[in-house]
Image (tube, helix red, strand yellow):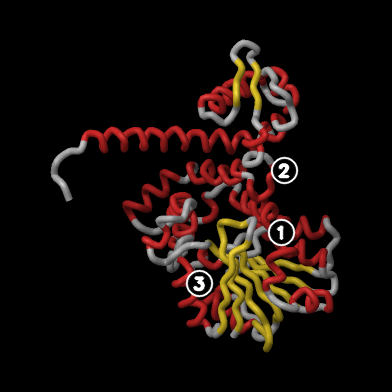
Amino acid sequence: MSTVLDTTRAQAFAEQALGIVNNGCLSLMLSIGHRTGLFDTMATLPPSTSDRIAAAAGLNERYVREWLGAMVTGRLVEYDPSARTYWLPKEHALSLTRAAGPDNLAELAQVVAMLGQVETPIVDAFRKGGGVGYSAFERFHALMAESSRTTLEATLMTRTLPLVPGLADRLESGIDVLDVGCGEGVAIRMMAARFPRSRFVGVDLSGEAIAAARAETEAARLTNARFEARDAATYSAPAAFDFITAFDAIHDQAAPRRVLRMIREALRPGGVFLMVDIAASTRLEGNLANPLAPFLFTVSTMHCMTVSLAQAGEGLGACWGEEKARELLAEAGFTSVEVSKLEGDPLNAYYVCRP
C-alpha cells in the first residue's frame, strides 16, 4: 500500500464518483419516465417538441420539458436545438419501454426510487441495529408484481416449468401446488389459468399482498387458487403438495432454514421444489465480474437483509449466493439440487430441488 498520493488516480476517482451521483439522479428520472409512460409514448413519435410529447402522453408540458432536460444531458434522448425537438432512438427504446419486456431497465429503476424513501430508517439501523419492516416500503408489492409479471410472461411457461421434466403433463392432469412468498399471486394466477385441473395455494406474510392476490384471482374467475396471509415459517402441510415454488422469496425470510424444512416436509413422494433466487456467489470476490452486483448489494442492504433483521431474523440478504443456498437446501433434506440460468432473466438462478 503506497503512502504517496497519486493525484491522477484521485482525479479519476472524483470523476467516477460524480458519475455515480449523476447516474443515481438519472435512475429517478428513468423511474418517472416509466411510470408516466413517457418512454412508451416517445417510442411511437418522430422527433417532437415538448408540447407534442406532453400532449401525446397526457402530461403537464412544463414537467415534461424539465424531465427531457435530464434525458438529453444524460445522453438518453437526442435533441435538435434548431427545431427544439426530442427523439428517443430505437436502440435506446429497446432498454426503456414496456415493449422491451424483461429488458426494460426503466422498470427496474423504480426500485431505486423506492429505496430512497427508507434511507433515514436504514441509517438509523446502521447505528442501532435491527431492521426496517415491510410496511416502510411504499409500493413494494405493486413493484414486485409488475416485475414478476414482466419476467414470468416471458419465461414461466416456455422456459421455467420445462426445467422439471414431465411437470407440464402432471399439471395438466391435476396436482397440488404451493407458492411460498407468493406476493400478489402473479405466478399462481398464470399457472391456475393454464392448468385448470391443478389446485394452487399461495402463502405470504403480507395481508395487503394477499388481499390484492384474492381480488385479482376473483376478477379472473379462477376457482382453483386460494391464498393465505401467514408466515411461511409457521405453515404446516405435511406431504400435501406435489410441486412447490418460491420466486425470489427465500432470502427475505426471517427463518429461511425453518421455511426450507417446511417445504421439504410439505412435498409428497416424487415431489419437486423449484426455488428461483438471486444469481450470486456467497464469496464476495465471486461477484466482482457480475455487472448487477452493486445493484444487488444495495437492494440487499436497503430491503432484503433489513426486512429479515426487522423480524429478528437471519438476515441472509439477496447475495446469500449459490454456495450458501446449497448448504441450506442440504440441511433441509434436499439431496438433489440442479441449478440453471435462463435467457431473459439475468437476475436469477433456478434451483430444481428433490429430497
Residue 35 shows in the view: no
10 Å neighbourhood of mark 1: few (<14), some, or many (≥20)?
Answer: many
Q: Which residue is mark 3?
A: 256
The image quarter containing residue 107 is top right
SS class, disc 3: helix
Q: Which mark is residue 15?
A: none
Q: Residue at x 66, y 79 (%)?
A: 272
Which residue appears at 65% of the width and 25% of the height?
Answer: 87
Q: Position of residue 299 (x, y in %)?
A: 48, 52
x, y percent for residue 183: 65, 60
In the image as oriented, which residue stretches furthest toward the left?
3
In the rendering, which numbered label is found on residue 99?
Answer: 2
Sequence-first tag of 2 and 3: 2
Residue at (48%, 34%) from the top-left corner? 25
Q: Secondary structure at mark 2?
A: helix
Seen at 68% across and 66% down, the residue is: 160
- Residue density around tag 2, few if under 14, some if 14–19, many if 20 or more, within 10 Å: few
Quadrant housing residue 110? top right
Measured Cα–Cα span from mark 2 to mark 1: 19 Å
Report helix, strand or loop for mark 1. helix
Image height check: is 352 above or below 97? below
Residue 27 seen in this snapshot: yes
Q: Amino acid at mark 3?
A: Pro
Residue 246 horizontal/vertical position (percent):
62, 68
Quadrant location of the C terminus in the rendered image: bottom right
Between residue 246 and residue 354, name the one nearer to us.
354
Quickly name the residue at label 1.
186
Amino acid at circle 2: Ala
Image position of 230 (left or right of 329)? right
